[in-house]
Amino acid sequence: MRFLTIALLVILAPMSIADPWRTNPMTKIDEQYMEDSRSDLNDLSRIELGRSFGESRDNDLRLIQTLLDRDIITSDQTRRLQAMGIIIGDHLRKENNLKWVIYVDRLGRSRALEVPFQDEAIFPVTQISSRAAVGADIDVKAIYQKLEEEIKRAKKKIIVR
């Protein structure tokens, strides 16, 4: 009996520790939400700063930083803060051959970038909003560089299935 108990614990323990997750394709509603968020942020930037997103990665990162530094977007504007994360994610996606997916785990669903051929996802959408929510300093360029490093690290992993 003791052997059977130990054997079951050894077999079942890894399953209880694992946090199950999966990725799903983006839905039309998710794509529309992201597009509307980008558009809203771009409209605000044109009105407040006279500049638009989409010129280049460095321009977009500077625009995001300026919107934050001038308190044009504040910590209670979660959708706009997450739109900044979407724009950062768009550049990461293009530069690193990633794709937008819906990441689902026990906490819910999130928009994420999937690293191809790896069991990894990157979460740019909430990078700025989570920092703003707690009043932390936000260095947009440093956030971008950190995410790039995470992608490089993930791509180097060898996955054994």
Image: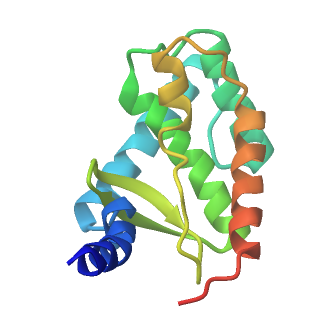
The residue shown at (47%, 39%) is 83
User: To which quarter of the image does residue 61 belong?
Assistant: top right
* Relative image position of residue 67 (x, y in whole percent): 61, 20
The residue shown at (38%, 15%) is 76
* Relative image position of residue 141 (x, y in whole percent): 77, 36
Q: Residue furthest front?
A: 1
The residue shown at (55%, 37%) is 127
Regarding residue 99, the answer to whether it shows in the image is yes
Depth order, front residue of 144/16? 16
The residue shown at (54%, 13%) is 72
> Which corner quadrant holds the N terminus?
bottom left
| Residue 123 left/right relative to 96 | left
User: To which quarter of the image does residue 136 belong?
Assistant: top right
| Residue 54 left/right relative to 78 | right
* Relative image position of residue 92 (x, y in whole percent): 66, 58
Depth order, front residue of 110/17? 17
Regarding residue 43, the answer to whether it shows in the image is no
Residue 126, placed above or below residue 44: below
| Residue 98 left/right relative to 58 | left
User: To which quarter of the image does residue 118 belong?
Assistant: bottom right
Q: Residue furthest left?
A: 1
Depth order, front residue of 49/90? 90
